[in-house]
Image (cartoon, helix red, strand yellow):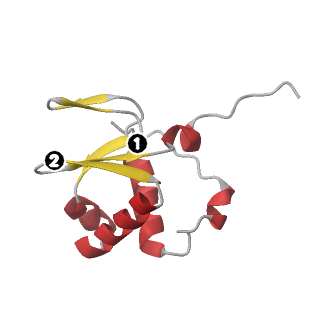
Amino acid sequence: MNKADTYIKLNRSILDWGWFTEPNTYRVFTYLILKANIKDHAFGKITVHRGELVTSYFSIAEKLRLSEKQVRTAIQHLEATGEIKRKVYNKYQVIRVVNYSKYQDSPEKSDE
């Protein structure tokens, strides 16, 4: 579940991220954060948790106007560096943005 009236946070430190200068990987990662569930949601017999989404290479490629090979490569980059984890099923995969809460939760308020 993602809502059109919600937003994601994008910290300026993204400029120093290793994949920032790799356009396809950066776009795919941003897309995954935008599409990830903001709360747990049932999908058939599984629960897709906050920070996860059900998708396929084809659907990402279609939405971002990339080839499936470009998406697959970007996903491999993100998985290799620990930004995401995947669980593959017959017709889809569940992708988890590993630090979703770190990226999207509000920072602790201080009394300073």
Quarter of the image for residue 62 reads bottom left
Q: Secondary structure at mark 1?
A: loop
Who is closer to the viewer here, 88 or 25? 88
Quarter of the image for residue 59 reads bottom left
- Which residue is the extreme one toward the right? 112
Q: Between marks 1 and 2, how big is the CA–CA gap? A: 27 Å
Q: Is residue 71 above or below residue 110?
A: below
Who is closer to the viewer here, 56 or 35? 56
**Which residue does the image show at 29% across and 68% down from the upper left?**
72
Q: Residues within 10 Å of mark 2 (few under 14, many from 20)?
A: few
To which residue does mark 2 refer? Answer: 89
**Which residue does the image show at 31% across and 50% down from the upper left?**
86
Q: Quadrant of the N terminus?
A: top left
Q: Secondary structure at mark 2?
A: loop
Q: Amino acid at mark 1?
A: Ala
To which residue does mark 1 refer? Answer: 4
Is tag 1's residue or tag 2's residue first in the polypeptide sequence?
Answer: 1
Who is closer to the viewer here, 91 or 81? 81
Residue 77: image location, x then y, percent: 41, 66
Q: Is residue 91 above or below residue 18?
A: above
Q: Would residue 105 be visible to someone looking at this image?
A: yes
**Which residue does the image show at 16% across and 47% down from the upper left?**
89
Residue 94: image location, x then y, percent: 27, 45
> In the picture provided, is 105 more to the left or to the right than 95?
right
Front: mark 1 or 2: 2
Q: Would residue 67 be visible to someone looking at this image?
A: no
> In the picture provided, is 79 more to the left or to the right than 48?
right
Residue 18: image location, x then y, percent: 57, 68
- Which residue is the extreme one toward the top? 111
> In the picture provided, is 25 more to the left or to the right than 93?
right
Q: Is residue 19 above or below residue 11?
A: below
Q: Amino acid at mark 2?
A: Tyr
